[in-house]
Image (cartoon, rainbow, N blue to C red):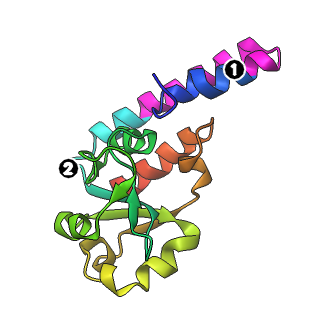
Amino acid sequence: LGPDTFEGVYDGVIRPVAAALGDVPAGESLVSRMQSTVSDADAKAASISRKPSVYYVVGFGEGGDWTAGGDTFIGQMIDVAGGDNIAADVSGWSYSLEKLVEADPQKIIIGEALVDAFLGTPKYAELTAVIEGNVYGVNEDIINRQGPRLIEGIEQLNAAFAK
């Protein structure tokens, strides 16, 4: 499992840091807690009667639209949390406005600091998630950065998808 996978955080971040700090048991304990939280999120996701279609905004605007493709750790987090990533068939992070409009997601997840700018951009105004008020601002640090806080990100995504 590579660093681009959610599980890669265990062997690529947590275990090496714990070893460098000389506390391997603490690292294993953290990995165990994270795996337990992921299992809980899987169970919660299974209780969602219909997975909502989801678009995760990494970036937008003049530079293009950027999201989490299916082969990214964020794409995996969306799946674990019970969402149906509209970019699951995409490799990497680049996405097109045309595909976004065509997919017309039910839920949009975006960094808290970007919500107002996104909502104020006319080309996104007709998306179902925008019209129905299903644009959720999240703390990007708990989703975009591979580390122990990813489990908080999964919980936040799960809560948004269950609404």
Asked which quadrant contains residue 120, the reply is: bottom left
Asked which quadrant contains residue 77, the reply is: top left
Crowdedness near tag 2: few (<14), some (14–19) or many (≥20) residues, C-alpha within 10 Å: few
Q: Secondary structure at mark 2?
A: loop
> The disc labelled 1 sits on which kind of residue?
Pro
Q: Is residue 46 above or below residue 65?
A: above
Q: Is residue 105 above or below residue 128?
A: above
Asked which quadrant contains residue 121, the reply is: bottom left
Q: Is residue 49 above or below residue 61?
A: above
x and y, in percent, of residue 51 in the image = 24, 49
Give the residues in magenta.
18-40
Can residue 33 be seen?
no
Drawn side of residue 9 relative to residue 53, left or right? right
Residue in view at x 55 percent, y 40 percent: 150
> The disc labelled 2 sits on which kind of residue?
Arg
Residue in view at x 42 percent, y 37 percent: 41
Which residue matches tag 1? Answer: 16
Sequence-wise first label, 1 or 2? 1
Drawn side of residue 73 relative to residue 33, left or right? left
Can residue 160 be seen?
yes
Residue in view at x 26 percent, y 75 percent: 127
Q: Secondary structure at mark 1?
A: helix
**Which numbered circle lies on residue 50?**
2
Image quarter hosting the C terminus: bottom left
Q: Is residue 103 above or below residue 120?
A: above
Image quarter hosting the N terminus: top left
Q: Is residue 60 magenta?
A: no
